[in-house]
Amino acid sequence: MVVRYPGKTILLVITALLFLVPCAGADEKVVFSWGFFLKSADGLVKSLDFDGPESVGKGDLLRVYLQLHEKSYVYVFLYDSRKDLYQVFPPSPDFYGHAFPAWQKYYIPSAREWFTLDGSPGVEKFFILAANNRLMDIEELAGKVIFERKEGAVDEKAVEIIEKKAAAISDPQSVSIDPVHVAHTAKLGPLNPGEGVTANRVVANGSYGLVLELVNR
């Protein structure tokens, strides 16, 4: 499927794999919320729960939701079926160099816009990483292979590093994930009858990683 992202055309596809990422300061909690909202061709909005493969198709719209709690540094990347890599969040390389945006809610690509899926086949991956300290190695890597790259294919080794970090496994007992209600506003649109929209509130020791795959029908 194709996603219209600012200045680029991005292919997408979602099966969820949850992993923990070890890092220093593991006794300090990482707390943040994430969600994916899908607006179908009939205009109704629902949450994607990732209990299994999520079905999306041509004409559907997708939006990513994030809320950072305390000092939890969150990074979201997309590796599409054209083998290109994008940093979905934070929006700029120096984002975490300023005052920490605790408790602020983010709708990506924006509060009024959606990614547009055009039904193109392929498998795309989202990598979500979170830690109680800035992941400077990831920030520097993203700076080189995403923000400073002019032409040519993305470095496959860079993608492998990010994916491995997101998929590194530690003690599954150190994380809790709970659904949280997301207030319905005009930013989302009408909901499926009888349904609300929810995000996932993650609490983990030190760090957390997540790999998501969207699957196009």
Image (tube, helix red, strand yellow):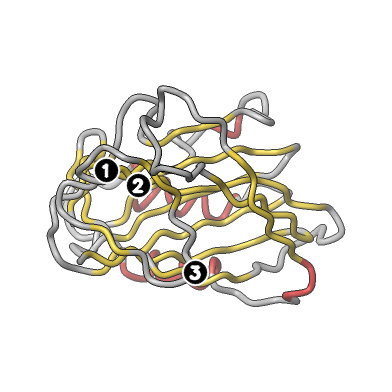
On the image, numbered disc 2 is attached to which residue?
Answer: 38
Report the side of 29 relative to 80 (left or right): right
On the image, numbered disc 3 is attached to which residue?
Answer: 51
Relative to 82, say whether 131 is above or below.
Answer: above
**Residue 159 x, y percent position in the rendering:** 38, 66
Q: Tell me whether circle 1 and circle 2 mark residues in contact (CB < 8 Å).
A: yes
Q: How many marks?
A: 3
| Disc nearer the start of the sequence (3/1) | 3
**Residue 124 x, y percent position in the rendering:** 29, 64
Label 1 sits on a secondary structure element that is strand
State the residue in front, 33 or 160: 33
Type of residue at label 1?
Leu
Report the side of 111 relative to 17 (left or right): left
Type of residue at label 2?
Leu
Q: Which mark is residue 12?
A: none
Q: CA distance from mark 3 to mark 1?
A: 20 Å
Location of the C terminus by quadrant is bottom left
| Disc nearer the start of the sequence (1/2) | 2
On the image, numbered disc 1 is attached to which residue?
Answer: 61
Location of the N terminus by quadrant is bottom left
**Residue 47 x, y percent position in the rendering:** 45, 49
